[in-house]
Amino acid sequence: MTNAYRTSGFVVSRDNNNKAEKMSHMLIEDTRPVLKAGMGMAASILKPHFLFIAVLFCFRASFSQTLQVNDLGYFETPGVNVLVFSNQYNGFFFDEKTAGIELIHHGVRTATGGAVRLQNTPEQWDLVPAVVDRKVDKKNNVIEVTLRYKEFDFDSRIRVAAKDKGVEIDVFLDKPLPEKLEGHAGFNLEFLPAAYFEKSYLADGKPANFPLYPSGDTVVKPSAQKIAQFAGHSTFDDRGKGEFILPLPLATGKTIALAPEDPERFVLIRSADEILSLYDGRNLAQNGWYIVRSLIPAKKSGLVLTWYLQANAVPNWKRAPVIGFSQVGYRPNQHKVAVIELDKNDTPLAKATVYQVTPDGKPVAMFTANVQPWGRFLRYQYFKFDFTPVQDSGLYFIQYGQQKTNSFPIGTEVYRNIWHPTLDVWFPVQMDHMKVNEAYRTWHGVPYLDDALQAPLNQQHFDGYTMGATTGTKYKPLERIPGLTVGGWFDAGDFDIQTDSHCAAILSFVDAWENFALDRDETYIDQDTRYVDIHRPDGKPDILQQIEHGTLNLAAQVKNIGFPVRGIVVPKLHLYHHLGDASTITDNLPYNPALKPYESDGQSSGTMDDRWVFTERTAWTDYHTVAALAAAHRALLNFNRPLAEECLTLARTLWEEDNQLFKGPDTSRWAAWFGGNVKLMASLQLFLSTKDETYGRLFKESIWPELDRALPYSISTALRAWPYMDDAYRVRLKDYVVKYKEYMDGLAKENPYGVPMISRGWGGNSMIVRWAIDNYYAHKAYPEIIDSEYIYKGLNYIMGCHPYSNMSFVSSVGTVSKKITYGNNRADFRFIAGGIVPGLLLLQPDFPENKDDWPFLWGENECVLDNCAEYIFLGRAVNELKN
Ligand SMILES: [Ca+2]
Ligand SMILES: [Ca+2]
Ligand SMILES: [Ca+2]
């Protein structure tokens, strides 16, 4: 996914929290438990198979409570929430599997995408409906939405009403279906495969298991019969055959019971008239879900479809407590505060205990203390357990009631290695234009030897790139731009080169090099033969080799194009969603229009798969690149002097040109999104590399108004300059650091973790890592204002002291960490060691989520370049703090 949306966001405001809090008290009073055995009801639903099901129900399940629309606008009973477009399709990346009618079932979001859809198994880039109207009728327990497909001038109305122990879903049409949508439009509800793996279903009583791996039946149909994907893009490579794949149902019936054997996952769907079909969306796309669907009948209007949906609620269900703590442990002198997350209906216990695990394997109770209430945040209640007095080096776990955490260490050296996997493994695997090997495994061959073509005009690319009416370069549309098959990293879980995230990563690496002389060498990198070998020292510091690798691509852009571009990315959607070895995305042969598609003469090919260079030019990317090249100059001076000199020359030239080109303030979307001022950053980096007061004066004049304008963004640049500035600067900056502390303390009071949690379409970990890094610089310069706990708090959060689970957000760092992430190996349900995920996604109105059994939600689990580089800095920085 593209970087642009990663840092845009909003802070969960105090008002929202308070509202949620008031709300929940009300709910506790309002919800009168109605505990009855559900057999009678179930039997009436499942008449034809009464005996079989009745036996199951007697022993396993009990539909207990009725659903009520709450003040937050969703249906609720303990254990079951039905959301009706509390979350809408936001248009960033189309179907993000976070919108429509959704189920939160015993604490887990297990269903999404309940809506009128145009495919059996909608993919990410299939059309999604817009919500044109949404009405919540709390009094009558009804939520109603009107959905619109503007492409077909097609509206539908969905009415969801509490009924019996579930909801009735009615679909209304004012006019019959447009002819084009007959046989296509249906009502869908998607179920999370991971929630139903190793479970079963009954379709009209006929038993079967959910497939662990997709192997359903499909048929091939002519393209003319397909409802096109957004903006004419296609996820499917039909090899010129003019066809598409249609998945067939796994099962059909009027009643489908999903996981009737599991009270926490049991969902019953009954259709009044139309057949229900169960599909496996993964036959078309690895990120597909299981889908239950009924086609909307043709030529009918008014009420066209009725479902009854009942999600079993376990009587008196309460979510198990989550004990948030640092999976890498603590240093002896640190504050140690676990945050206990409880179901709002749970009764808190008075105390928690820390046990030491001794060498003879016996737990010894070391410390017991009261848990302190913090209050409500979103849908949970929070308590803190402070075990700071535990200081002896050793292995520990925390026990709260029946809940025991896994073990974690306390010791002076606990942070020594925490950044190693990111530098040793994650970054090497992301290296573009190189073969990457690790012991017996090859991560990928040499990719993109056919880079790259000037992007054609007037493009709206699916990964956020755009091209306007001119190229702005000396190249014609689709002309080859030479010199670009060098350096660079894959942006994230996808394989494009994003120039701005390169600049951020390089700047962060240079910071790490200059602050910590970080000379770890565990990677062999040879540019001449394009070969990388993990866990193999080559006598050269890896961080300098990585700075070199990123800089090679930046410099190539500026040299060959004249300026840094927005990015370099595959032209077609069916290439973009690639999963597997990066060297097989394109054919690695330059495109030759004289040949036919899929034809090759051994030197070139007729397949248009070469990446396109999106040559949008902005002040933001230009100055960002100046800053990165100027910084790289210093780091590379004694490592690759010719490249270092070239970097500085390119940076100075670009700076002069930019000052002519971009005279006014930066009003680009980048400046708006990121709030900062990269020109300031560029002037500082040029000053540090040249000691030329022309740059220095500009920085010193501009920094103060910038701090007044946008303190939270500018403080990081101001603090990075601190070691190189005079006393007057340091005295003046002190007042801003005091203000910064007040601002950050305010944000941190919003939640029990004391860190700025921000989320909109993308989890907030990048913000938290940057916050902790800024606090590190502030602590170094002004320890009397910012103490080291401001850094540890950020790290603890990333390492497991956060909502939803207590997993470390960095794969392979800490006792328990993310084992499933949205890396390029996500289809294998695996991770790339050292990747840091975005973290908690806030689903409206009150559900923070970070799935640990499903890698495909990028906003929760996609590791990205700039944040991984910043994590290395933070992981190394905490080792500098006093023990
Ligand atoms: Ca991307
Ligand atoms: Ca090395
Ligand atoms: Ca090619």
Image: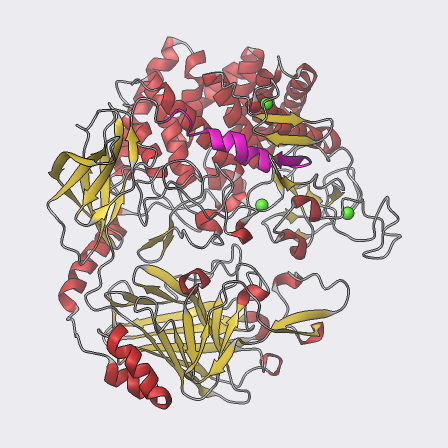
Q: Which residue is drawn at 68% across and 31% down?
A: 531
Total numbered labels placed on residues in the image: 0
Residue 504 appears in the figure:
no
Figure quadrant, ligand 2: top right
The image quarter containing residue 63 is bottom left
Magenta-span inclusion, residue 61: no
Residue 164 lies, in percent from the top left, at: 26, 81
Quadrant containing the C terminus in the rendered view = top left
Q: Residue at x 72, y 48 (%)?
A: 586
Horizontal relation, residue 257 to residue 436: left or right:
left
Up-down relation of residue 598 to residue 170 (above or below): above
Magenta-span inclusion, residue 418: yes
Magenta residues span 415-437
Horizontal relation, residue 674 to residue 580: left or right:
left
Q: Work out whether residue 667 or residue 741 is closer to the camera in this orientation and state it.
A: 741
Q: Work out whether residue 521 or residue 838 is closer to the camera in this orientation and state it.
A: 521
Residue 699 lies, in percent from the top left, at: 49, 19
Residue 27 appears in the figure:
yes
Tell me, what colour scheme is on the image? Answer: secondary structure
Residue 754 lies, in percent from the top left, at: 27, 37
Up-down relation of residue 310 to residue 711 (above or below): below
Q: Which residue is drawn at 30% across and 47% down?
A: 803
Residue 469 lies, in percent from the top left, at: 71, 49
